Image (cartoon, rainbow, N blue to C red):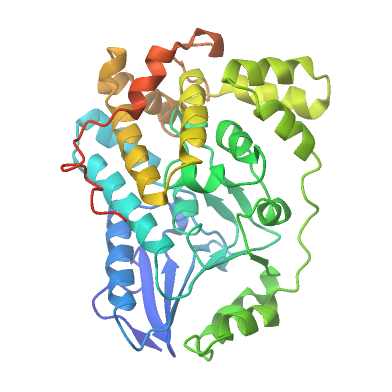
Amino acid sequence: MNKNPELPTGNAAEIVTEVHGHVGLITLNRPKALNALSLPMIRSLTKCLLAWRDAPTVHAVAIRGTGKPGPFGAFCAGGDIRFFHQAALAGNDELEQFFTEEYALNHLIHDYPKPYIAFMDGIVMGGGMGISQGAQIRIVTERTRMAMPETNIGLFPDVGGGYFLSRCPGHSGEWLALTGEIVGAGLALELGLADACFETAQLASAWAALGSSDFDREGAVDQWLALFSNAEAEDPNAHTAQIDHHFAKHSVSAIVHSLEADESAWAQHTAHTLRRRSPLMLHVVLAQIRRARHMTLADDLRMERDMIHHCFHPRHLNLGDAQSEAVEGIRALAVDKDNTPHWNPTRIEQVEPSMVTPFFGSPWTPQTHPLRDLG
């Protein structure tokens, strides 16, 4: 097992990389932050994947997280939102760099020419979805807790979320994007957000077996999967018909009013959840998902790069950077932890189209866009 000398290794490194046999192995190693992605982690991952993409001796790549119980204890809770908050208030240009480089990494993974295998154990949220949804093999377990919860902090499901959520069956993508609900292994498989389910007790053996597998040989991925993917996932969500009925409505207001008129416990819970999210960003997110349904991944990521710029620089709302929904949402959830964000506007019914449309206007020309080279 050979450590990669060009990347940080050891217990203090935020990612650990090694090559076992002909497989490049990546362990996210920031357990105290649930492996939330930092800018150095994004840069190290990109550097590693580019090197292994071009290395003839590396035939496949696998990635896992780590946590208090050890390897596979958690995958990745997203981006480092505390950094987002601090950087936004300080006017730190690394915030812009973070999203440009993260989205480029997401695209690299989706387009990776070699098998890329994501062990999505434990928490898989936000940026964790960005570095796993493009994988050829997405493995979940009975401990998987998957979500795109960005509307809870005044943001939107980025990292290609518009692309992969909009391709979920029916209108489940709108449901996941707007509510940020957490789903387990069974529903992840049902919605096309995972490919196989392993028992957590088998993860270490599956990881170790990668090094003795010849992924350059046809059928090797399927053979490796067949050895370990015999776990039974939980039952799929029983509310598919309700999701499609309510979340097919033409607007956020119509969705919420439809839910509130439905006396079932699920509909009432869902309506209550939406009433707690950022009203402005709910409208933005619904437009995002429905636009992205007809986009390539590269075009979706360019759109999301435009959107994230406006999230932290809400000039079109005549607001300063410190007054954005994102800064307020992160403050309430992760900084002051009072869980009482002061959204502006305060109600879904108060959001005007003129507040939403500018999120989709690019501050760059096609020639100067930071993601112009994607695709």
Where residue 88 sits, quadrant-wise, is top left
| Depth order, front residue of 218/187 | 218
Residue 80 showing in the rendered view = no
Q: Residue at x 26, y 40 (%)?
A: 95
| Depth order, front residue of 70/275 | 275
| Depth order, front residue of 166/144 | 166
Looking at the image, residue 103 lies above or below residue 289: below
Q: Residue at x 64, y 26 (%)?
A: 273
Tell me where residue 156 appears, x and y as whole percent.
45, 34
Tell me where residue 12 appears, x and y as whole percent.
34, 66
Q: Residue at x 59, y 34 (%)?
A: 174
| Depth order, front residue of 329/226 | 226
Where residue 223 sits, quadrant-wise, is bottom right
Residue at the left extreme, as displayed = 368
Q: Is residue 60 left or right of residue 229?
A: left
Looking at the image, residue 343 lies above or below residue 198: above
Q: Residue at x 76, y 26 (%)?
A: 267
Residue at the front extreme, as displayed = 294
Tell me where residue 226 appears, x and y as whole percent.
69, 80
Looking at the image, residue 276 lies above or below residue 175: above
Q: Is residue 348 left or right of residue 192?
A: left
Residue 296 showing in the rendered view = yes
